[in-house]
Amino acid sequence: MIKQEKFYKINVDKLKWEKIDTLPYLIGFIEFSEDYEYFDKIKHLLIIPEKPKSIEELSQELDEKFEELLVKTKRKFAVSKETAEYYYNQKFRKINDDFEYIKEWGSLPRFTLSASSLSSSTEFRIGNGDAGYYTNGSDLRIYMPKKPNFIVGFCMRNLLGFKWVNGK
């Protein structure tokens, strides 16, 4: 029985970057067989097809990929659950702290917005301070617990257009 030789074509993209000393092994041939005496020196330049994988190998690779994706997805769900629980606990801890503060002191110190009727206009009051308040000339007043320093007053007046009014 005659053995049929396998011939491999040259990969031109790989040949572009090859050193000049490989060129003598390539002269005169377009395809090379495994019986060529310098086959090992030019093997990396040839297009050699890979042996096709069996169904069992493909099935095993697919199972491994699915298992890896399942592990990653479970990990992401666990992290997402922990993050959601953490933010839930933080939010409700703050709400409970606010309720406790309100029970003890009667109101929240952070931010209160109240609208009271004064003749024909409405006054918006933000904060619970007695040192004074900022106003923009309309009915908006931002009450502060202590008088601001020079830099804050300068910036509020010149950059934002708020005027400081001393309290009672």
Image (cartoon, grey):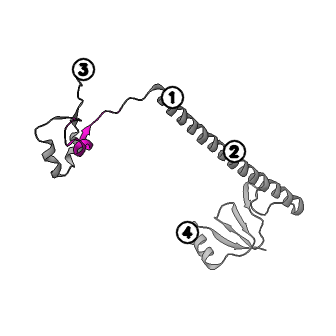
Q: Name the disc covering residue 81, or none.
A: 2
CA distance for labels 2 and 3: 68 Å
- Disc 3: which residue: 1
The answer to which of marks 1 and 3 sits earlier in the sequence is 3
Q: Which residues are magenta?
A: 33-50
Marks 4 and 1, the one that precedes in the sequence: 1
Q: Write down the residue under mark 1.
A: 59
Whole-percent x, y for residue 165 in the image? 70, 72
Type of amino acid under label 1: Ser
Q: Badge 4: few (under 14), some or many (20 or more) residues near its Cα, within 10 Å?
A: few
From the viewer's perspective, is the residue at label 3 or at label 4 nearer?
3
In the figure, is residue 99 to the left or right of 84? right
**Which residue is at a point 75% across and 71% down the rendered structure image?**
145
Label 2 secondary element: helix
Q: Nearer the viewer, residue 121 or 72?
A: 72
Q: Amino acid at mark 2?
A: Lys
With respect to residue 128, does 84 lie above or below? above
